[in-house]
Image (cartoon, grey):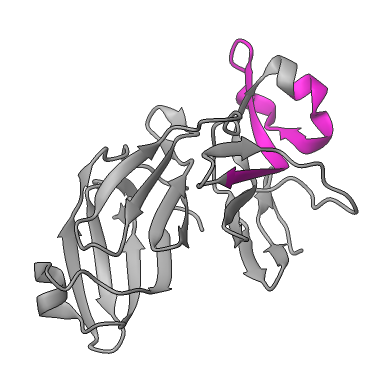
């Protein structure tokens, strides 16, 4: 999902919190919406990352809550997902360019405190935005996106990276990738598995979904071309 993170989930809220008292009964269905960018009069405005919108699907009520902790920079193109009552966001783009930082927030306690994730093992993917995520077997599996790499990395992995022609800046280059990276929240580790079969073309701004034990991607863009599969 590009530019925002929306999570569907069923969880038990903290019944001692004001939010739970006013808004929801136990085991109610929610939609949580974190959108760090908005367009006003054709101008893109970064919305502060210290607020989250909660919608009670049964009561039809929207409420906004203040977020604290290690609040991430306001960005667009962030990839968000929900796992075990936590919302994770990875990547995105701010006024300084793409990032490869990860943050999470506990959705179950009604406090909405951001925490920056520092991996214990492995290396995070290169900075990128507009990527997708599959959630499977307790892990977060990321695919694709648009971002920058150093020249040495581009040269050694050119099959997975399509250069954006006018992007050269010293030894960094921007472009689209079709890489797969896995983050294990329990171990705090990043890994990059070897994939097999017919690899999807590099892309960004695509749709992704998990069904059973399979992850799907569809559409997206590369260069000025829209992809249909």
**Residue 38 at x, y percent in the picture:** 32, 54
Magenta-tinted stretch: 154-183
Front in this rendered view, residue 200 or 226: 200
**Residue 152 at x, y percent in the picture:** 73, 15
Q: Does residue 42 appear anywhere in the picture?
A: no
Q: Looking at the image, how many numbered discs can be counted on the residues?
A: 0
Residue in the picture at 60% in, 34% down? 125
Front in this rendered view, residue 32 or 116: 116
Q: Does the stretch in magenta take in 175?
A: yes
State which quadrant residue 93 falls in.
Answer: top left
Residue 32 vertical placement versus 187 (above, below): below
Left or right of 119? Residue 144 is: right
Residue in the picture at 67% in, 32% down? 164
**Residue 48 at x, y percent in the picture:** 24, 46
> Which residue in the rendered view is the most extreme toward the bottom?
58
Residue in the picture at 58% in, 49% down? 131
């Amino acid at each position: 999902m590009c530019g925002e993170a929306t999570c569907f989930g069923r969880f038990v809220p903290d019944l001692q919190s004001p939010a739970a008292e006013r808004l929801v009964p136990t085991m109610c269905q929610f939609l949580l919406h974190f959108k760090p960018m908005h367009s006003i009069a054709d101008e893109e405005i970064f919305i502060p990352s210290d607020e989250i919108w909660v919608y009670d699907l049964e009561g039809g009520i929207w409420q906004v809550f203040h977020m604290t902790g290690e609040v991430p920079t306001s960005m667009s193109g962030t990839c968000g997902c929900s796992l075990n009552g936590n919302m994770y966001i990875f990547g995105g783009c701010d006024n300084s360019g793409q990032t490869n930082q990860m943050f999470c927030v506990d959705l179950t306690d009604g406090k909405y405190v951001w925490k920056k994730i520092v991996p214990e093992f492995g290396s995070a993917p290169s900075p990128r935005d507009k990527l997708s995520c599959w959630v499977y077997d307790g892990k977060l599996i990321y695919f694709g996106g648009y971002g920058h790499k150093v020249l040495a990395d581009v040269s050694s992995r050119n099959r997975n990276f399509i250069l954006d022609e006018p992007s050269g800046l010293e030894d960094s280059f921007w472009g689209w990738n079709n890489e797969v990276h896995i983050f294990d929240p329990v171990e705090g580790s990043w890994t990059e598995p070897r994939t097999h079969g017919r690899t999807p073309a590099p892309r960004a701004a695509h749709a992704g979904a998990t069904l059973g034990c399979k992850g799907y991607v569809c559409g997206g863009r590369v260069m000025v071309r829209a992809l249909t599969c």
